[in-house]
Image: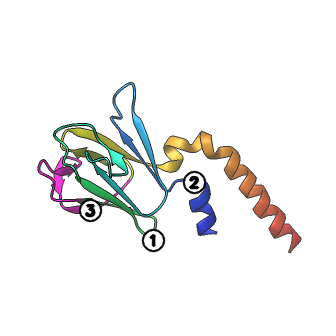
Amino acid sequence: MASLRQTLMPMATLIFNPATETPTVVELTQGVTRIGRNEQNDVILHDSSVSSFHAELTLLNDGSLSLKDLNSTQGSFVNGSRIDQVVLKAGDHLMFSCVEAKVAPAHEELGERWKPKLEMLAQAVRAVSSSH
């Protein structure tokens, strides 16, 4: 069932520039997400203060989210503290140099979007359960 959940719904959501009128939402579904200025990153930040390969986020097997700074010049910060590597939790405020982001659980930011799929999945599970 876990693999089905990963297919249907992101495990975590990162919101860049959350206090602006145009925040950017990045859905994290599995593995490693690289962040930086270079075009080879998964998330490209067009800010000269951000290192080419600034940081990486890793979704761990237990569903938690880890942030690792990749020896960036200006640093990565979680809730105001500079970090090398840390496990994140919902509500954490991140800074990649001067670019702000927020960690939100997928259901908090995207709940309405996924609600029909979750209801359909719940109906399918009930149908299978009642047939056994």
Q: Earlier in the sequence, mark 1 or mark 3?
A: 1
Going by the numbered disc 1, the residue's amino acid type is Asn
Q: Quadrant of the C terminus?
A: bottom right
Say which residue label 2 marks. 9
Q: Earlier in the sequence, mark 2 or mark 1?
A: 2
Residue under the point 19% across and 38% down? 98
Residue 131, image x, y percentages: 88, 70
Q: Quadrant of the N terminus?
A: bottom right
Relative to 19, is 36 above or below? below
Going by the numbered disc 3, the residue's amino acid type is Val
92 left or right of 3 in image: left
Say which residue label 3 marks. 86
Q: Which label number is shown at residue 130?
A: none
Q: Which residues are magenta?
A: 69-89
Mark 2 Cα within 10 Å, few/some/many (few <14, many 20+)?
Answer: some
68 left or right of 128 in image: left
Residue under the point 18% across and 46% down? 80
84 left or right of 30 in image: left
Q: What is the C-alpha distance between the residues marked 2 and 3?
A: 24 Å
Residue 38, image x, y percentages: 27, 48
Q: Which residue is most to the top?
A: 21
Q: Which residue is most to the left?
A: 73
Mark 1 Cα within 10 Å, few/some/many (few <14, many 20+)?
Answer: few
